[in-house]
Amino acid sequence: MTDTQANKNSLSKEASLSKSLFLGNIIEENLSPYPKLEGEERETLQMVLDSVDKFMEPRAEDYDAYDEKGEQPEEYINSLKELGLFALIIPEEHGGIGFSNRSYSRAVQQISRYDGSTSLTIGAHSSIGIRGLLLFGSDEQKKKYLPKLASGEMIGAYCLTEPGSGSDAASIKTTAVRDSDGNWILNGEKIWITNGPFAEFFTVFAKTDSEGGKLSAFIVERSFEGVSTGPKEDKMGIRASGTSSVIFSDAKIPAANLLGEEGKGFKIAMAVLNSGRTGLGGGCVGGMKRCIKLASRQAKDRKQFGQSISEFGLIKSKISQMTVDCFAAESIVNLVAYYSDSGVEDYSVEAAISKIFATEALWKTSNEALQIAGGNGFMKEYPYERIVRDCRIFMIFEGTNEILRLYVALSGMKQAGEYLKEIGKSGANIFNDPIKGFGTLRGYANKKFTQLTSLGRERLEFVPDELREEADIFEQYTLEFSRITEVLLKRHGKNIIGKQFASNRIANIAIDLTVGLAVLSRVATMIATAGKESESVQQAIAIAKIFSQQAKRRMNQKVRRIERNEDDARKALSDFIVSEGEYPWDTI
């Protein structure tokens, strides 16, 4: 893959776009120009997309049948193998296609336009199941497993969640103990493992009580003695994809199958999730594009009161909002994938933001598509109800959006805290583990980047005149964001970790700033490369203006609620209801 020379020369690999916002800084070189695929990889990607369309488009009725039955037939899985869809991110030297994260995300997007369960089967393999091997595996491990994973002889799965540990990975109970031969004996159970019923390759995390850490990662084959899987789960959505528990009963794991360093499993687990988020993000964008296509055609064809419902203002509002949200989600997902491909050292907050925004945008978009379809949307003979069921899980797995919001807020405030003398060294250290068991925070550069306030208020140079007003919004609120971050840190000190209402508001502002800047970058590059005369670019400019004004209203409300809110009343009400165990009022 080749990028524009400007991108190669200007990208700051040490800087985090989102974390710098907490300091009132916008890292402009990480925004402009907006990344674009070029060259041979783009051609290969187009061939894969065409193959996906040809293979999946005629199978709409099959996907309904798979959903109804709750499984994908073996012959269908074999067809996915033959199509090469399990080889997307595996390097060519090991028999794979060798896609970058951007190309992979775009391929998953195409698959998701047709069937969420298929997208998940592919994604669980590539996004997380085998990514630990790609990122941390030894040459010997890669040589042994990657060719089989590329061909589909082995399908991968990611085993982290347990009955007593979801987002709190530090509470994992699965153990790995060395035996006298130096091998490992694995005991425990993992739950809700996508591809669990048929995967042959498991990336498993277990407690090892090592000096370097309490968690280690292992490559486990289904064929190993003591490895078994539970019955297939019966789910609300993505029903055709396989989900089960994976059980380890004195399972003997060869010493050579330790993945990465002993005791570094926590780092591996989080790196896998961060690196793989663009697969989920791409899937969300693909689902949204399908919803927009369905909704626009439904609105045009359905007649009420003598005219197409597409002429009604409230329907126009829905379709335009679906489009704005899809464009914004696509913008941030692609930007995060570019950071991953380009070796940016820390994009964990941006990755979390892309997951939060894309999954919630898909949820809203799917509901609006169903609403536009009216009563038909509620009927199983139409695609809407399955789309709604399928996408609900996205806000839960790979880190719930609630946990990720806390991660976004506390990670960013950690960096800000390091620069506040009032907090001091001990104050900065409290953020080293902001959410127990969820994420390790990366090191940060000690230098402070040039602040927007250094020369009055420095303007974003890449933004053209057509978007000047919108750029002013994000410049202004970046400064306001840094101000309220400092206020909260001074007010709460180490107790900020327990202030989840405030952290949630901080996270939502960071989300709007990051996504909004991605949108501005993308549209500015469109203007620079294609000109502003075309209808397509004009509508993209309109999208940037709509998103910016909506973000401004949301951010203004969140800033105001830092000082004036109903948090105490809401907490007290929740405590009362929990103590009662039910809703206690009635009208009789």
Image (cartoon, rainbow, N blue to C red):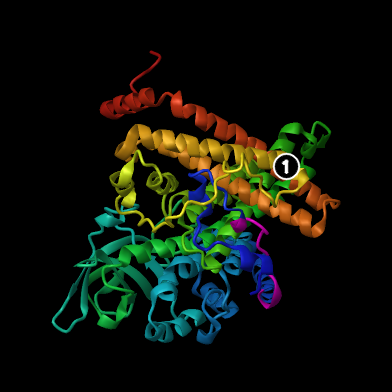
Percent of width and height locating residue 471 = 67, 42
Res. 274 in view: yes
Question: Image point 32% across, 52% down: which residue?
Answer: 432
Q: Disc 1 designates what residue?
A: 468
Magenta stretch: give its range: 29-41
Question: Image point 59% across, 57% down: which residue?
Answer: 30
Count of numbered marks: 1
Work out which residue is located at the far top of the displayed protein and give it.
Answer: 588
Closer-to-camera residue (36/464): 464
| Disc 1 secondary structure class | helix
Quadrant of res 58: bottom right
Assess disc 1: are there few (<14), some (14-19) or many (≥20) residues with their C-alpha within 10 Å of its C-alpha: some
| Relative to 311, 126 lies left or right | left
Question: Image point 13% across, 82% down: which residue?
Answer: 180
Q: Is residue 525 above or below residue 197?
A: above
Percent of width and height locating residue 549 = 66, 36
Quadrant of res 494: top left
Closer-to-camera residue (429/317): 429
